[in-house]
Image (cartoon, rainbow, N blue to C red):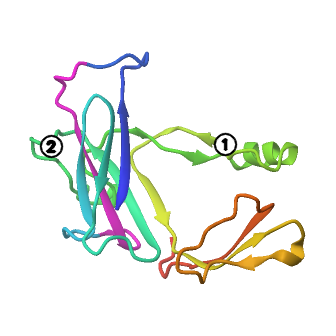
Amino acid sequence: MVSIHTQWLDQDGSPLPEALEGYTGRMAKITAPNILSTGGSGTATFAITPGNHQQVLKFKGDILGTEHFYVHVSGFSTWQSAGIGAASSGPLQYRPKNYVPIKVPVLDESATRIGRNLNAYAEAVYEWPYRPEMQFSVFDLKIKEIQVVGDSPDTAQNIYPDTSPIIDPDASMVQLFFALLKGKMRH
């Protein structure tokens, strides 16, 4: 499952009329370089209408392990021909035929690094440029241990193997040990 949050407002931030036809978004699993899933198991579409909305997209077999996704918005509403398809040839052959520029988050590494030099817990800084598409990845996080530490480091206890692990509210620290599994596909 993937939760999609859409926000479509006027340029000044005011609400748009609900009668606008809207757009169609598509999210597809990337199955190989420049290849998107074409079947129902790896592709989902969603309506984009004025206002703030949240939709949950389910994929057949759900998301297992590391997956890479592609998102773009077509200039057609869901009740029209969605206009989803690739440009025929040339340098844009792997890009959508019809698209609407969308704001996408792009990490500002320099600003993030500066912020974290001043405060180790500073949040990442993102720019929000308009782009014709967006790609993102979901990584499988394999938890190895969850250690709860009491007053001294000698009191660390691994609670992950417990059937119902509970973190003691009096614990001074919780340590999470994990392995981030890499995907098989290279970008």
Q: Which residue shows up at 29% across the image and 43% down it?
A: 99
Q: Secondary structure at mark 1?
A: loop
Q: Tag 1: residue type?
A: Val
Does 28 appear in magenta? yes
* Mark 1 vs 2, N-terminal side: 2
Q: Which residue shows up at 31% across the image and 62% down it?
A: 28
Identify residue for label 1.
125
Query: Where residue 177 appears, x then y in whole percent?
Result: 69, 76
Q: Tag 2: residue type?
A: Thr
* Residue 78, numbered label: 2
Position of residue 3 relative to residue 153, above or below, is above
Query: Where residue 179 appears, x then y in whole percent?
Result: 63, 79
Give, as a single range, the part of the protein colored magenta: 17-36
Query: Where residue 5 appears, x then y in whole percent?
Result: 38, 43
Does 7 appear in magenta? no
- How many other residues sit within 10 Å of disc 1, few (<14), some (14-19) or many (≥20)? some
Query: Where residue 21 appears, x then y in whole percent?
Result: 16, 30
Q: Which residue shows up at 25% across the image and 33% down it?
A: 49
Q: Is residue 184 left or right of residue 79?
A: right
Between 81 and 171, the one nearer to me in the picture: 171
Splitting the image into 4 quarters, where does residue 123 fall? top right
Predominant secondary structure, magenta span:
strand
Splitting the image into 4 quarters, where does residue 76 fall? top left
